[in-house]
Every structure is written in C-alpha cells, then in structure tokens.
C-alpha cells in the first residue's frame, strides 16, 4: 500500500547534505518519490509499506550522520532555542578570534624575544584549538560523520581549510619558508565568520518559515467538552469525533463541527477573510480555530486532528514547500557533485602552486592589480593560502537555499492571504498563464438568486411583493427564498394562505383571502390560460434575469426579476488580469443571452455558452491550443474535469470538495481578487528564485578562480561564503515587502 510520510532531519547544513540524503532514501526499495528540503530541514517520502518503512528511513538518515526529529517542522520554541544557541556560539568564537588577533598585533608591534614570541604563537594556536573544540565543535562533528558515511558536505571543506591553517604553526617548526604569522589567525577568523553566517542564516530561515508557525498557532490548545454531563478540559489532540464541545465567549472553536445548542457571532476571518463577525445558530457548521465573540453554544465535533480545516490548510502549505520546481533541477545536479569537485580542485590548486609558482604568482598579480584581496606570500605558504581559500569559498549552501527559501516565503504568504498552493510546480506555472477561464455560477456570481426588481401590474409594487411573499413563505425553492429575503428586508409580513400546492417545475398556488393565486413561470400561466403581457423591460442589467409571474383568475398582478448577482469585484479582477496581459473567458452552461449579459457586466469579451459538464474540459483544451498556459476557476462538481484539464486549476474555497481536490490552487476567501494576486505572487516568487540562483552561480563563478589563483585571502573567502547564504535567504524574505 502506498503511503507518504514527512520526516524531520537534524544536522543538515548545506545543499550537499540534502542532496545525498535524498539520493540515499531514493535508493531504498519501495520508495517511489523523495523530496528533501534543506530550508525546512525535513524530507517527504512516498513509499510502499510492504517493502520499506519509517525504521529503514531512520536507519539510512542516521548512517549519513544526521538524526531524526520527532516533530515535523521546526516549532517556535525550538527555533528560538536554536537561534540563542547559534548566537551564543558566535559570540564565544568572536571572543576567541579577537583574542587571537590581539595577540598577533602585540607580537608584531612589540617584537618580543624569541622565547616569548614562540609562547605567543603557541597561545594563538591554543586559543584557535579551543574555538574548534567548543563553539565550532559541530562543524568538525558534522564533517566526521559525513566522511564516515562515505560522502563530503560543506563542513568537510570548512574543517579541512581551518585544520590546514591551524597545523601551519607546528609545521613551521620543521619546515622553513612558512611564517606562522600568516596563518595563525586565519582559522579562528574563518570560524568566527562562519558561525556568524550560521546565526544570521538561522534568523532568516526562521522568518521564512514564519507562515507555518502562524497557521499552527491559530488553533485552540485545549477543548472544553461535555462528558456524562460534566465539563472537562482536555488537550486539543485528545478530542474525538462526536465529542460535544462547549464554546464560551472569547474562546476558540476547538474542532470543525455543527452547533447543536445555542448561538453566537463568530470571527471567521482566519478562514474567509471576512472581518465582520458572522452569526451562527443551531444546525450551522463551525470551523475550528474561529473565535466566539459573544455567545455560548455547544457543537458536535465532526472533523478533528488531521481532518480539520486548519490541518488541511497546513498540510497543503507544507506540501507546496516540500515540492520542487523545474527551475531547481540544474542547482540539484550541480550540488550533488559540487563538494567532491571542490576537493579535487583544492588538491590541484596546492600542486599547481608548488609546481608552477611563478605562473600562478603572475596570475595572482594580475588579479591583485584590479582587486587587492590577498597577501603576497610565496612558496609553500602561497600554496597553503590558496588551498585554504578554495576550500572555504566553494560552498554550495547558496545554491541549496536559493529555491526552497523563496518557495517557503511565497507559499506561506499565499496561505496568510487565503491562497493555498498545492505544489511548487503549480506556483511556477501560474506566472505563465495567458488566459483565465471562469465558471459563472458560484464563481463570477454569488451562486444565490436575488430579487432584482418587483413590478406590480394594476397594483402597487410592494403589494405584489407582499402577495408573492405569502405564497413563497411555504416553499423551499431557491427562487422562493430570494423573494422571501427581499420581502423581509422591506419589513413585509406574510398573510395566511390555504390549499398551498407546489407545482413541480412551474411554481406554486394557494388560496389567499378566498382568492386563487398562482406564482411561477410562463408555462404555469399558459397552463391556466392566463395571458402573459409582453415585457417592456429594456434594462441591460435584467436581460439575464429569470422572470416569475404573479396572477389570479383575472390576469397578471405582478412580475419579478430574479438572478444570481455578480460579485462586486468581478469587473476589477478582469481589468487587473487584462493589465497583466491575461485574457478572461466566461465558460457557462447558460444560454447565449444570459452568458453574454453576465460577461458584459464583468468586462469579459470572450464567451463560451451552453457548455455541458462534459464539454468544459474539451473547451479548456481548445483554449490551451489558442493561448498556451490556461487557468480554470470553478467551484462545482461539474467543473472538476475542466480544473484537471487546465494547466492551473483554481477552486473557490466555498465550493465542493471534489472541485477543491481537483484544483492546484484553492482560494479560501470569497474574493476573486486573490486570483490576480496569485499571479503576482508567482511572478515575484520566481523573480526571487532567479535572482537567488543567479547570485549563487555568479558568486561561485567569480570567487573560486580568485581563490585558486591566490587572489583572495581565506578570511575574505569565508566572509563571502557566509554572505552568499545569508543573501539568498534575506532576498527571499524581501518578498514580503513586494506583496504587502
């Protein structure tokens, strides 16, 4: 049986770590798909539980030198603890590094006797070694575990570079031509900048994963339930389907369910975006994590744990953040072989400086004439300096973080605004959309009929509505509810009726004050031989409306125009899409007149009408041939095939579960303006990804040759390396400013 599991992984520090973890897990028999996310520090694995399972995954992860984290995702408390630990290690290392630099400065200025000079050099050696053993210990432990697992990560490069510079001190005692002054402070400064980079990166990563933590914090922590007539408070994870939850004023609803007693005004903004409280009474459904503003009610839990609305939202965001996008494939291929290539390159650099010193020095001189970033060492010292710089500078971290951090921020921002993106691939495709196909009912319109106009014939308009209200009060038809709602809004009262009859497909009839009345369509009036007057209505806003007639035995008493109303933001959305170069298309099952009338009100020029559910997928395919990348927006079961056919399926969150399941993007809030926002989100996210990847590749393209030819001091190399990782993560976080 196919299963999917998310595994938290501690100890991954670079793209090489995530690449080899993904490769090792993928090689397990029964594993069909693996996505390891460096930014989130976890893995998503699809597997056949008859062939493998969590125990095998844990064994493989541990064999690589990493550990399995029980909790999926990094909680706020853990994130804070990690940042505090990283900060503490950074400051300790800086204290040691500054002490080293002070000693070096004193030795150069005071020029003490040889014995004191040697003592000073060994003191520098001891302070550097102390930094390696304590604040920077994790670097060397990670490097050892990586090598023991048969691979090499970024920490191997840092470890080799710093150890090489540290060992110069004892090496200088037996090898002439090496000045320990050139190397004494390098290792400690490299480690200080390296740990600073880790701290800043940890802070930036925490900012990038903020959306998930915000979502998780929305839910209630405890639930007050009624068991055997007694109120009992339990942890939220102990609540079960069928439990009766008590929700008092100011409390969060603990689970998705239905009110069985009481009423209240609820703040549902976390789910719908609606800022105004919504009244909910007996029989109404409530959403977990919404807030009870002023009432008291009891609700029966129907969806708990992973089935709840909030859990599903979190799951979709996590899936999007775990997914990979096509643009990342090149970076993945590079990082998988990057560290071994760098190790070979470092070895070649050392040999080249020993075998061809004059030629290498000449190239260094050329670079130094442009950018003086290195010291003028020679011989073995120059070879060691260039080798250390090469090891330190060539870090694949920036490549590994470039895409996932931007995806984390982009998908998280979407979730905060009510846009749930199922995958990174969907987010990437969204930017290429050239046409958006809109379903009509429930998408461009509210999906509920409304009385647009009431007109009395021979009687007052209000009297005609009052009579219609009296007949429709006993009916449950959607058109009936629209008339009832309009009458109630005007303060009208229904009159007593007798002999009420519902006439299927035609309308209703009843006796009112001894008079027989009919209310229905033209077919009902023709059936009763009541002549229907020719409509003189020319209002374009009513051309798409359904007409309902009120009549008695003498003739027509009134006519009512009812229609599904257009969302107020629909026209703005169509205009916004047009400004982006995207064509809006209306796809409706209605006749030509109604479809064109709706389209005209929304500013849509391209209309496909009288489309049956089976036709919609075919029409979307035709539009793909015409425009290229096409998005489909729908909300009903009949839209599911078209949503699947489209390059991007967008489901309105108030629609059916089938439509939402078929979609790539779900709009949680009842607002079409989130669709152009989703396009902007995609464009800005991938602008950041391209910027990050360009910087990561450009950085290595420029920095590595400088290091190889000795034109870059190792300390400057470490600063550049640390800055590259911090830069891509910080740049991803700048998305928030773009889409405020």
Image (spheres, helix red, strand yellow):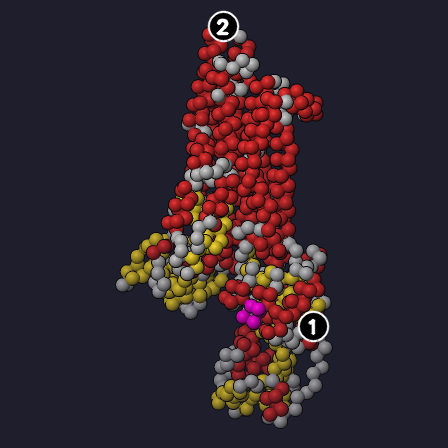
Q: Is residue 324 visible?
A: yes
**From the viewer's perspective, is residue 291 above or below residue 527?**
above
Q: Which of the numbered marks, if any, corresponds to residue 226?
A: none
**From the viewer's perspective, is residue 477 above or below residue 297?**
below
Q: Is residue 557 magenta?
A: no
Q: Is residue 639 magenta?
A: yes
**Prevailing secondary structure class for the magenta stretch in the rendered image:** helix
- The residue carrying mark 2 is 113
Tell me residue 26's x, y (percent). 47, 50
Quarter of the image with the N terminus is: bottom left
Quarter of the image holding residue 179? top right
- On screen, residue 5 versus residue 593, left or right, reads left
Question: Looking at this view, is 327 or 350 the one in front?
Answer: 350
Would you say the residues marked 2 and 1 are in contact, meaning their CB atoms lie under 8 Å apart?
no
Quarter of the image holding residue 127? top left
CA gap, disc 2 to disc 1?
97 Å
Figure label count:
2
Q: Residue at x 52, y 11 (%)?
A: 107
Q: Residue at x 47, y 11 (%)?
A: 118
Tell me residue 404's x, y (percent). 55, 46
Q: Residue at x 52, y 32 (%)?
A: 157
Q: Which residues are magenta?
A: 637-641
Question: Looking at this view, is 52 or 287 the one in front?
Answer: 52
- The residue carrying mark 1 is 596
Does label 2 or label 1 sit earlier along the sequence? Answer: 2
Q: Residue at x 56, y 32 (%)?
A: 344
Tell me residue 222's x, y (percent). 36, 53
Question: Looking at this view, is 144 or 558 the one in front?
Answer: 144
**From the viewer's perspective, is residue 649 above or below residue 117?**
below
- On screen, residue 117 versus residue 305, left or right, reads right
């Amino acid at each position: 049986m196919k299963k999917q599991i998310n595994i938290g992984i501690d100890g991954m520090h670079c793209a090489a770590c995530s690449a080899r973890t993904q490769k090792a897990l993928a090689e397990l028999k029964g594993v069909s798909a693996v996505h390891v996310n460096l930014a989130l520090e976890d893995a998503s694995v699809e597997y056949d539980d008859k062939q493998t399972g969590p125990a095998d995954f844990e064994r493989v992860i541990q064999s690589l030198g990493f550990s399995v984290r029980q909790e999926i995702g990094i909680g706020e408390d853990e994130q804070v603890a990690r940042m505090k630990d990283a900060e503490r290690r950074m400051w300790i290392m800086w204290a040691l590094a500054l002490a080293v630099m002070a000693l070096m400065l004193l030795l150069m200025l005071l020029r003490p006797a040889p014995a004191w000079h040697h003592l000073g050099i060994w003191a520098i050696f001891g302070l550097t070694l102390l930094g390696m053993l304590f604040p920077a210990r994790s670097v060397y432990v990670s490097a050892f575990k990586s090598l023991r697992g048969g691979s090499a990560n970024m920490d191997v490069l840092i470890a080799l570079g710093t150890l090489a510079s540290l060992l110069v001190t004892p090496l200088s005692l037996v090898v002439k031509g090496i000045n320990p002054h050139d190397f004494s402070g390098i290792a400690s400064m490299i480690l200080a900048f390296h740990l600073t980079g880790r701290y800043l990166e940890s802070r930036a990563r925490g900012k990038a994963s903020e959306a998930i933590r915000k979502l998780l914090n929305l839910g209630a922590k405890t639930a007050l339930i009624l068991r055997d007539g007694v109120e009992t408070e339990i942890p939220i994870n102990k609540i079960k389907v069928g439990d009766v939850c008590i929700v008092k004023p100011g409390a969060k609803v603990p689970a998705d369910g239905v009110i069985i007693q009481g009423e209240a005004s609820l703040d549902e903004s976390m789910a719908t975006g609606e800022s105004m409280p919504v009244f909910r009474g007996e029989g109404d459904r409530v959403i977990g994590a919404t807030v009870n503003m002023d009432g008291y009610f009891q609700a029966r839990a129907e969806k708990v744990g992973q089935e709840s609305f909030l859990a599903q939202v979190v799951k979709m965001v996590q899936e999007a953040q775990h997914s990979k996008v096509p643009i990342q494939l090149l970076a993945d291929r590079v990082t998988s072989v990057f560290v071994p290539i760098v190790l070979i390159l470092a070895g070649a650099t050392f040999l080249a400086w020993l075998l061809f010193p004059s030629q290498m020095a000449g190239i260094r001189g050329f670079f130094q004439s442009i950018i003086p970033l290195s010291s003028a060492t020679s011989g073995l010292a120059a070879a060691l300096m260039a080798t250390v710089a090469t090891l330190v500078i060539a870090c694949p971290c920036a490549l590994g973080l470039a895409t996932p951090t931007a995806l984390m921020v982009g998908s998280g921002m979407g979730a905060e605004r009510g846009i749930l993106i199922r995958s990174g691939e969907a987010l990437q495709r969204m930017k290429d959309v050239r046409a958006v196909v809109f379903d009509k009912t429930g998408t461009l319109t509210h999906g509920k009929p409304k009385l647009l106009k009431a007109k009395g014939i021979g009687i007052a308009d209000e009297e005609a509505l009052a009579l219609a209200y009296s007949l429709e009060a006993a009916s449950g038809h959607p058109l009936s509810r629209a008339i009832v709602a309009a009458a109630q809004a005007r303060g009208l009262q229904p009159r007593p009726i007798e002999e009420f009859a519902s006439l299927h497909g035609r309308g209703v009839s009843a006796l009112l004050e001894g008079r027989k009345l009919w209310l229905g369509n033209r077919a009902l009036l023709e059936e009763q031989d009541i002549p229907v007057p020719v409509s003189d209505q020319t209002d374009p806003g009513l051309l798409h409306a359904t007409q309902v007639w009120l009549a008695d035995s003498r003739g027509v008493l009134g006519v009512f125009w009812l229609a599904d109303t257009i969302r107020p933001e629909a026209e703005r959305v169509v205009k916004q899409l047009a400004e982006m170069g995207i064509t809006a298309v209306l796809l409706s099952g209605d006749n030509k007149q109604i479809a064109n009338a709706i389209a005209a009100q929304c500013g849509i020029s391209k209309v496909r009408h009288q489309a049956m559910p089976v036709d919609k997928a075919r029409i979307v395919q035709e539009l793909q041939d015409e425009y290229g990348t096409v998005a489909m927006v729908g909300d009903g079961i009949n839209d599911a095939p078209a949503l699947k056919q489209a390059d991007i399926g967008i489901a309105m969150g108030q629609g059916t579960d089938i439509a939402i399941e078929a979609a790539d993007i779900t709009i949680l809030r009842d607002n079409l303006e989130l669709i152009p926002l989703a396009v902007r989100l995609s464009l800005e996210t991938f602008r950041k990804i391209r910027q990050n990847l360009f910087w990561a590749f450009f950085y290595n393209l420029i920095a590595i040759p400088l290091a190889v030819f000795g034109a870059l001091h190792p300390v400057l190399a470490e600063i550049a390396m640390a800055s590259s990782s911090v830069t891509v993560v910080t740049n991803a976080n700048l998305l928030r400013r773009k889409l405020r």
